[in-house]
Each structure stands twice: as C-alpha cells, then as structure tokens.
Image: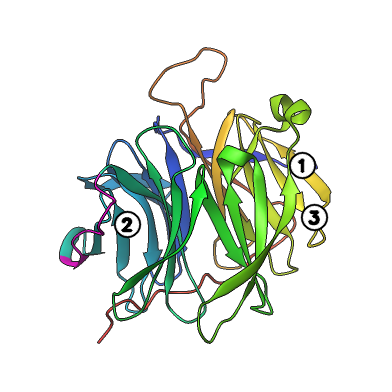
C-alpha cells in the first residue's frame, strides 16, 4: 500500500510507545519509556510538547473521567490530570522491583491488562489484569516481551503480542469476568522473514476487525486479516516502528511511534519521531479504564 506518511513530531525518542488518542481533548499522547517522558500532539495547531517528565511510563490508558492512568516502573500506577500526577492507584506490585510495565490496554469492562518486562533477559514477561477496584491479578507468565493488545469488535477475542517470540496470540475473552483462555497462535514471523518484516510490536484494530501491527526493525506497518494472513504493508521512514493508534475526528488518521532516536544513525535519521498517515481505514474508539473511579 502506498500512502503519504507525515512526520508530525520530529522527536528523538529512545523508545516512543503507546500512542493514544484523547477524544475529549482532541490530542494524541505518547510516551518515551526510558526517558520518563510523556508527549502530546495537537493536530489542529500542529504543535507537540512534553507534558510529563518523571519515572518511566511503559503504557497508559484513558480513564472514564478523562484523566490518564500511568503504568510506570516497579509495578507503580498513578493518575495523571492537568499535567501532574494527582494520586497513586497502586504503589507497587510484589516481585516487580526490577521490572516495568511495557504495554497496557483497557478492556470493555474498564479493567486494564498490563504486560511487564524485566531489566534483563529470559522468558520472565508477565501479564496482569487490574480490576476496577484497583486489585491486581497475575494471569499469564513465561513470555519474553509482552506487547501490543487488542479486542475484537464482538468482544469474544483478545489479541496479545509477544515481541520476543515474534508472534501474536489470540485468547478467548469473557467480557463479563475479564478472563482469557484457550490461547492459540494468530501469526508468527519466521526467522527467515524477520530481517525484512521485523518483529510484531504495538498494535491496534480497525472498525472492520483487521489488525494493524507495528514492526520493530521492520520499518513498516502490517495489516492482518482477522484470519491471520497479511493483506497490506506500509513502508515507514524509520526502522523501529513501535506502536500504532487511530485518531482524529473520524478516527481515520493512523499515528505511529518509533524508537532509536537516542542513538543517532545517519541511515535512520527520523528514528524516534511520531508519524501520521491516512491508510483508507478507520479505527474504533478505545475503551476507557475505570480503575478506582468513584
């Protein structure tokens, strides 16, 4: 697929991640994880700015009241509103002292699924579910790099990416309980393809049920059919495309974050920037978290 790709924020993020459209504010937020920074982009003024600088934010969700829920290092979760951290939702989760959250998503019931990775190697990535009362539960472990997630339109399936294994799984999902079960493989990038296609990273799902997967080290975004085969690819101006999200009034703008800007590379001059394109598809409004809402 050939589309025009704009560089809307020429940041040099070390690991730009978790783009999320805020429909109330008409702004696109994203994080630079290791730098501990949160940015936002205004498509009306074409202005971007840093609005947070503190502990690393691996991912965040939009709360029902319009605030953001920041998932940080060491199992810490805080609320962010009016450009400041207002209160702590979870001080820490045991056994996560040497980890950070990596990617998170709110589910249709207002819970949050949150992946964690350790500062080291090994298959020690975990997936937690945070209930609306703030209680947490470990629901899966043994992954390499938990990453992008999404829900099918009928709320029967949850997709879950393990970047380290270069694959996307799907689970049977129960919206009433938040339980996931019966994991099966949705797609996997073979070793022989990885040098070209890269590894699956962040993802989103459009209003037709197609999966859009950002490709780390692949310099592209891949659109998958719900049955798992590739239907389109979009080449991008940076090699480490880390995540994607639909935004704009019509949710027809696709935003993509990237990484690698902290180590300048003449062969990858736009690494770490935020990009925007109109791929001819539109997204669905993201679910909002309702953790500890009064």
- Main secondary structure found in the magenta portion: loop
Pick the front one: 34 or 273? 34
- Element type at marker 2? strand
39 or 26, nearer to the observer = 39
Q: Is residue 90 magenta?
A: yes
Does residue 88 sit above or below 263 in this rendering?
Answer: below
| Mark 3 to mark 2 CA distance (whole Å) | 30 Å
Task: Classify 10 Å Cα crowding around label 1: few (below 14), some (14-19), many (20 and above).
Answer: some
Which of the labelled discs sits on residue 71, or is there none? 2
User: Residue 77 appears at what percent x and percent y?
Assistant: 26, 61
Proximity of marks 1 and 2: CB atoms separated by less than 8 Å: no
Q: Residue at x 37, y 77 (%)?
A: 131
The residue located at (38%, 32%) in the rendering is 120
- Name the residue that disc number 3 marks: 228
- Secondary structure found at label 1: strand
Q: Which residue is drawn at the image coordinates 80% and 42% (left, top)?
A: 1
Q: Which residue is mark 1?
A: 233
Range of magenta residues: 87-97
Residue 90 screen position, x and y as percent: 22, 65
């Amino acid at each position: 697929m050939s589309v025009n790709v704009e560089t809307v924020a020429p940041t040099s993020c070390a690991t730009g991640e978790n783009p999320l459209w805020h429909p109330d504010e008409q702004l696109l937020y994203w994080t630079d994880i290791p730098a501990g920074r949160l940015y936002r982009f205004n498509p009306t003024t074409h202005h971007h700015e840093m609005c947070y600088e503190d502990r690393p934010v691996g991912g965040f969700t939009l709360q029902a009241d319009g605030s953001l829920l920041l998932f940080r290092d060491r199992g810490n979760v805080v609320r962010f509103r009016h450009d400041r951290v207002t209160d702590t939702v979870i001080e820490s989760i045991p056994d996560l002292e040497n980890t950070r959250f990596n990617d998170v998503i709110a589910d249709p019931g207002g819970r949050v699924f949150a992946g964690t990775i350790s500062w080291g190697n090994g298959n020690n990535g975990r997936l937690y579910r945070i209930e609306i009362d703030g209680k947490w539960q470990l629901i899966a472990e043994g992954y390499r790099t938990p990453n992008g997630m999404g829900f099918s339109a009928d709320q029967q399936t949850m997709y879950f990416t393990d970047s380290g294994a270069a694959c996307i799984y799907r689970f049977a999902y129960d919206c009433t309980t938040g339980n996931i079960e019966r994991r099966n493989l949705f797609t996997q990038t073979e070793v022989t393809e990885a040098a070209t296609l890269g590894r699956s990273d962040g993802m989103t799902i459009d209003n037709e049920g197609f999966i859009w997967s950002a490709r780390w080290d692949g310099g592209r975004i891949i659109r998958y059919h719900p049955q798992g085969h590739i239907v389109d690819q979009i080449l991008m101006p940076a090699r480490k495309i880390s995540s994607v999200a639909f935004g704009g009034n019509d949710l027809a703008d696709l935003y993509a974050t990237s990484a690698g800007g902290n180590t300048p590379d003449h062969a990858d001059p736009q690494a770490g920037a935020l990009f925007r394109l109109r791929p001819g598809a539109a997204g669905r409004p993201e679910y909002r978290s309702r953790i500890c809402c009064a």
